[in-house]
Image (cartoon, helix red, strand yellow):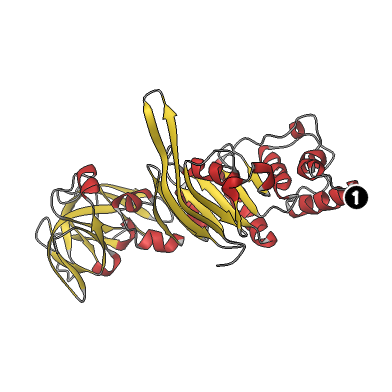
Amino acid sequence: MSHRTLSVESLTKVFDTPEGPVTAVKEVSLDVAAGEFFSLLGPSGCGKTTTLRMIAGLETTTSGTIRFGGRDLARLPPAQRNLGMVFQSYALFPHLTVLENAAYGLRVRGQSNERIKSRVLELLEVLGLAGLHGRYPSDLSGGQQQRVSIARALAYEPDMFLLDEPLANLDAKLRVQMREEIRRIQKELGVLALYVTHDQEEAMSVSDRIGVFQLGRLMQVGAPEDIYRDPTSLFVADFIGKINFYPAEATGSGPGGVGLRLVGGDTATVAKRHPLTPEEKASYKVPGDAVVAVRPEHQSLLPQDQESSLPGVAGRVRRALFLGNMTRYFVTCDSALGEVVVESPRPLPGITEGLDVKIAFDPADAVAFVAQGAA
């Protein structure tokens, strides 16, 4: 393992509250390689920010280890971990100029004035802030202020770059621009980055890998495409993008995958298979022992009387929504867990609102979740 790798093992945090102990993070383990952009993704209250704060030293650990470069970070105070951190709030000093704000960490470390000015001006150039070094925060836009906070975090060449919802206070268009800037800067400087967000699109667009959190647990780690195409739990499938769930009964398994009978009669053999836990079966109100999950863009709509070799279920088009780059169909379906969404790059000929249809899919694009012992 590289000495520049971050290694977190069995990290746990329990808070004592008047109502009793609350486990915010439970036995999280992950490795992040040197130069990797790794996002901690999940809904509010899932433990991702607490995990980041423990790595930063802003929160104590209940148990577990945090190692980087052969050092046990959990034993070191925050100032000795050599981390650069960017928060949701810019946290700039209003009475200091851009240069002075960005130079703060270097001054605290006793660097020479010559070294400070050279390093900060170099970073401001990289961040598109050249010529603004004499301005004050009140003279800057939100995006510029966030760039200054990034410059401050990177000025002293930290071993890790930690970002906690850094774009939450920016408007939608600026968020897209800034996330690309952060990714570009991180790759240009080659620093390991940990990025906390609840925004799936944001995480998918900038990350080398993503760790998806739920209720304090790390549910799945992988490249964005792998997590999207092959989620290992109903929660991850549901949280990352849009997806449709079709209850089914397992009929057996073989070399080609697990055999399934969809509610409504069609059968399918699905190669990608993961466990359906009792907790998720109850949470998602799954009536049978299996679920077939299919993304909206991996489905097609056919008139019910049209022959098809693909498996599917019956439904009725409730709404056809033309969005320019695609058409989204909402389909009422008794054989699905909730309303079905189908997306097509162009309007489907003859498919209109109120039409009875077959929702068809290729089993190669589906993922099966099967209860233990079912097949």
Apparent side of residue 375 relative to residue 94 in the rendered image (left or right): left
Q: Position of residue 137 (x, y in %)?
A: 75, 34
Looking at the rendered structure, the secondary structure element under dot 1 is: helix
Q: Which corner quadrant holds the C terminus?
A: bottom left
Q: Does residue 72 appear anywhere in the picture?
A: yes
Quarter of the figure with residue 362: bottom left
Across and down, in percent, residue 326 comes to: 39, 56
Residue 27, placed above or below residue 138: below
Q: Amino acid at mark 1?
A: Glu
- The local crowd at label 1, few if under 14, some if 14 to 19, many if 20 or more residues have their Cα within 10 Å, is few
Q: Nearer the viewer, residue 299 or 272?
A: 272
- Viewed as shown, does residue 345 lie left or right of 34? left
Q: Is residue 96 left or right of residue 208?
A: right
Expressed as whole percent of the image width and height from the top left, the position of residue 190 reads 66, 62
The one of 343 and 367 positioned closer to us in this rendering: 367
**Residue nearest the viewer, comparing 330 with 192:** 192
* Residue 224 percent location from the top left of the image: 45, 60
Is 141 drawn above or below residue 325 in the view shown? Answer: above
Which residue position is annotated with label 1? 114
